[in-house]
Image: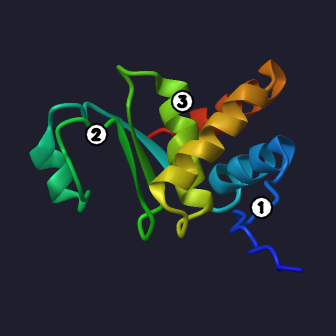
Amino acid sequence: MARRKKSAKPVIVRRPSVQSIVTNICQLVTEQGWQVKLERLFNRPQFCKDHGVAGSLDNVLGFTEHPEKIVYVDYRHNFFDILIHEYLHALYPNLEEDDIEALEEYVMERLTPTQAKRILRATVPALI
């Protein structure tokens, strides 16, 4: 009897609950001192380059500076989605962009209005 070759299955990593992500985001700004800076980023490649952003710089809508604990968001484009995306970079600095995008989609599909308000309430005092 011939043995079947094992198929390569993707490793399934258990995602944290949306509630735990919301709690961690709120702790970033309320307990860990992260701040949010609203900027015009789109089509400002020099500004992004000056802040060490890598890759294509013409379409940047947000980025995260870890040592300074600052999240930059272009307030003119899908503000809340970008904010969540950048908060996820702050929470998970070692994740690749594709993984952050997948996690952002997971969170945005499941986020309740109450959870969104909680994030916004934590964000407002962190605005600089």
The reply, left or right, for residue 87 in relation to residue 119 is left
Of labels 2 and 1, earlier in sequence is: 1
Q: Secondary structure at mark 1?
A: loop
- Toward the right, the furthest residue is 1
Residue at (77, 61) in percent of width and height: 12
Numbered mark located on residue 81 in the image: 3
**Residue 48 x %, y %:** 21, 49
Question: What is the three-letter code of the residue carrying label 3?
Answer: Asp
- Which quarter shows the C terminus? top left
Q: CA distance from mark 2 to mark 3?
A: 13 Å
Residue at image position (73%, 66%) is 11
Whether residue 33 is visible to the viewer of this picture, yes or no, is no
Q: Secondary structure at mark 2?
A: loop
* Residue 91 percent location from the top left of the image: 62, 59
Q: Quadrant of the N terminus?
A: bottom right
Quadrant of the rendered image containing residue 120: top right
- Residue extending furthest toward the left: 46
Instruction: Give SS at disc 3.
Output: helix
Among numbered discs 3 and 1, the one appearing first in the sequence = 1
Residue located 85% across and 47% down the image = 17
Pointer 1: what residue?
12
**Above or below: residue 69 compared with residue 123:** below
Q: Give amino acid for label 1.
A: Ile
**Point 13% across, 44% down: residue:** 45
For the residues labelled 3 and 1, the Cα–Cα distance comes to 25 Å
Q: Nearer the viewer, residue 114 or 101?
A: 101
Q: Are marks 2 and 1 in contact (CB under 8 Å)?
A: no
Report the disc number at residue 60.
2
Q: Nearer the viewer, residue 28 or 95?
A: 95
The color scheme shown is rainbow
Q: Quadrant of residue 6?
A: bottom right
Compared with residue 15, is residue 73 higher up or lower down, i.e. above or below?
above
